[in-house]
Every structure is written in C-alpha cells, then in structure tokens.
Amino acid sequence: MNEDENKVSENTDLDLNDEIYPYKNDVTFNENMEKAKSVEIARNTYVYTNAEDSFKENMSTAWSFLGIGVVGTVFTILNLTGVLHIMQGFMQKGISLLLFLGFMVYGIIVIRSKKICLLRLKKKNPIEINLKDWMREKFYR
C-alpha cells in the first residue's frame, strides 16, 4: 500500500465547498439562507386544524389515558395488597399509584371537556358546509 494514498490533500475543502454549495455566490441563495435562519417566519405561521379531527384526537387520547390509568392503578393496588409481588418498596408503589391516578384524572378531565369540543364542532360545521356548497356552485359546474 502506498503512503500517499492515505494522505489528505490540503485543497479538499475548496473542492468540497464547490460541490456542496454550487450556487454560493448567487444572490437568491444568500437571501433564502437568511430567511431560513429567521425564526420570525415560524412564529407567525398558523396551521388550520379541522375541528372534527381535533375532537377525535382528544377523545382517543382521553380514553387511552383513562385506560392506562385504570389498568395501572389496579396493578399497583394488587402489588400493595400482596397479591402480586412485582414492585418492591412502598416508595415505588406510592409513586406509581400517584402516576396512574394522575393518568385517570387527566383522562376524565378531557372527557368532561367533550361538551366544549362539541360546541366548537357545531360552530364550525355550518361554515364548512356553506364553504363547500359555494365551491361546488362556482367550480363544479
């Protein structure tokens, strides 16, 4: 093996920069890079979320938290009473019981806020229906 093959040449940085950034001197490239670095663009951007999809996501999250909380609480109580001997020490059992009770409480709170989500859904539905009807009249003739 030749020792010159393993040497790094001194001008590789220039060659790599030319290949990676072929349009480095282009004005639009520099402007776009500055815009991409700016955080203000992302701060003032809002994304439309469909109320029905948001409602479904909230309900599935609530039921998931409630289910995990119930199963975990039952599991922890079985360990506290001595039926199961998986958890050792009262500190571990107490913390897990508090954690799973917190899951249950969060799930119940989200399920109880279902009324607010349904009101928001009913409020947006007529607007969407009117918009879809208008688009059908104007564009699908």
Image: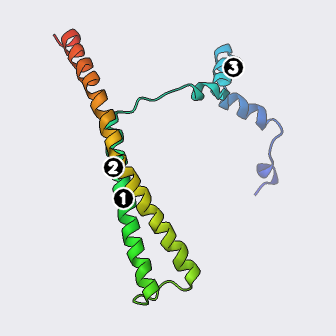
The amino acid at mark 3 is Asn
In the rendered view, does 123 fall on the left or right side of 87? left
Residue where numbered disc 2 is placed: 59
* Residue 23 appears in view: no
The local crowd at label 2, few if under 14, some if 14 to 19, many if 20 or more residues have their Cα within 10 Å, is: some
Question: Which of 13/65 is in front?
Answer: 65
Question: Which of 116/23 is in front?
Answer: 116
- Nearest-to-viewer mark from 3 and 1: 1
Q: Quadrant of residue 51?
A: top left
Residue 62, given in percent of the width and then of the height, sits at 37, 54
Residue where numbered disc 1 is placed: 64
Q: Is residue 114 above or below residue 104?
A: above
- Nearest-to-viewer mark from 3 and 2: 2
The disc, 3 or 1, on the residue closer to the chain's N-terminal end is 3
> Whole-Å distance between the Cαs marked 2 and 1?
8 Å
Q: Is residue 132 above or below residue 3?
A: above
Residue 128, given in percent of the width and then of the height, sits at 27, 24
The amino acid at mark 2 is Met
Residue at far right of view: 10
Q: Is residue 101 above or below residue 93?
A: above
| Quadrant where the image shows the C terminus | top left
* Residue 115 appears in view: yes
Determine the residue positioned at 71% across, 34% down: 16
Determine the residue positioned at 23% across, 13% down: 134
Determine the residue positioned at 30% across, 39% down: 118
Residue 47, given in percent of the width and then of the height, sits at 45, 29
- How many numbered marks does the figure carry? 3
